[in-house]
Amino acid sequence: LSGVQETLETYNVRHDAFDFESELGWEGSNTAFLDIMKNTSYFVPQTQSNDKGVPEGAYLNMQQFIVDQKLPQGKKGYMKPYPNLYVLRPDGSTLYTFRDIVYSFKKAHQSDLILNVICSEQDLAQQKVSLAMYMMNPELLGRQYHLQYDLVKLKTGKMSGRRGRYLLADDLYAQLKEEIRKKMAQKYEERGDKVSQEFFDQVTHEVSTAAMKYALLACTCSTQISFDIAKITDFEDASAPFILYNSTRLSSLIRKFEGLVEKGVSKDLPDLSQIDWSVVDNHMEWEMLMEFVLGFPSLLKLAACPALPKPPQNPEFGVHKVCDFLNMFTRKLSSYYGPRGVRILPHRSQETITDEQQTALHARIYLCKAFRQVIDNGLDKLFIKPLRKM
């Protein structure tokens, strides 16, 4: 457990609390719950000789329960016929699924909604647990959902525990960070920038953890992730480094404006209410304002607050939509203030600026601050730390 915590700490991810399965046995919850379960009409006790003459554990007849409750089966419903839910071995000892049901009741007592984040391979098992909760207490229908995720697939091949082919998360991060450090060192060299070793280590760490998080969150939960280090460290498109780099370009632009104010070349920003927006005459500026700045709250609601469907369907959270949103926004943004885009700051040789330039400059600095704030907010929702310098 300490090893898992250490790995997650790299990405600034922490748990609020831990529950231990053994506690359910020590406090007597398993025994008490089993006594209640045995009194249901769907409980079939264990036997040393079933109709086939072999030992069989105790189970809940889920198919009969589904029929009695007139629950949907087939497309978008429960599978037909539905398999039994085994809770005891032939010797009377409890199975993990039974203990999971007991634990789920404990979680339901402490919360309004349960989202079990577990691999997609456990979908049927998790469905059975939720169905058993409904069987034991009808008020718990729709209280617990399985938020499934798929596995990570490496570009170099498939991992296999049996064959000893696997890669630890820490090892993958080390490879990722090495690639990030190499690319960023090259960028600094090309630009002639000299940065301290402390700054370089800090920035490459933040960019590396951001790249890992973005790569894992950019796919839907039910999609297998193809992990390609070259792609997720690409500073040109569809990656955390790409988004962070362009975000820091906005910060650099805002700092340069503040420098002009200090030198007396430009006036400081007036109150927002005094801005003349009619001078913002580039169609791309209004597109980004309407589509990305004003559209961001709706996007967040769509991604983070899906409607809860009737079981056995599970809600589909769209964190990947935030990733797509940030990537599309950054693409447009890079074109906006790129070589062929809109000139925001006056030319370096200018010692004074005209009133018309000043009015447009103030409006566009406010726009850039709004653009940066949206990117910062989006990155924050992905647990990625926004950067001001790279």
Image (cartoon, rainbow, N blue to C red):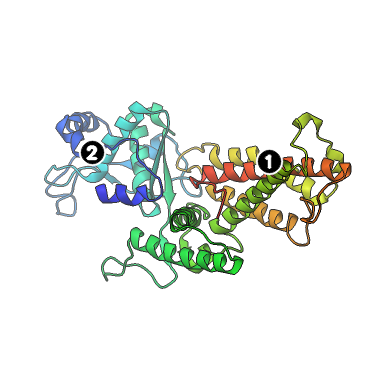
Which quarter of the figure is the C terminus placed in?
bottom right
- Residue identifier under label 2: 20
User: Does 110 sit left or right of 332 as displayed?
Assistant: left
Q: Neighbour class for label 1 at 10 Å: few (<14), some, many (≥20)?
A: some
Residue at image point 63% right, 41% down: 373
Q: Nearer the viewer, residue 352 or 362?
A: 352
Say what amino acid the circle numbered 1 marks: Ala
- Residue identifier under label 1: 370
Q: Nearer the viewer, residue 291 or 284?
A: 284
Q: How many marks?
A: 2
Label 1 or label 2, whichever lies nearer to me, is: 1
**Residue 99 placement: quadrant:** top left
Q: Neighbour class for label 2 at 10 Å: few (<14), some, many (≥20)?
A: few
Mark-to-mark CA distance, 1 and 2: 46 Å
Q: Which mark is residue 209?
A: none
Say what amino acid the circle numbered 2 marks: Phe
Residue at image point 39% right, 44% down: 13
Residue 376 percent location from the top left of the image: 58, 44
- Is 384 located above or below residue 177 in the figure? above
CB of mark 1 within 8 Å of CB of mark 2? no
Q: Nearer the viewer, residue 242 or 232?
A: 242
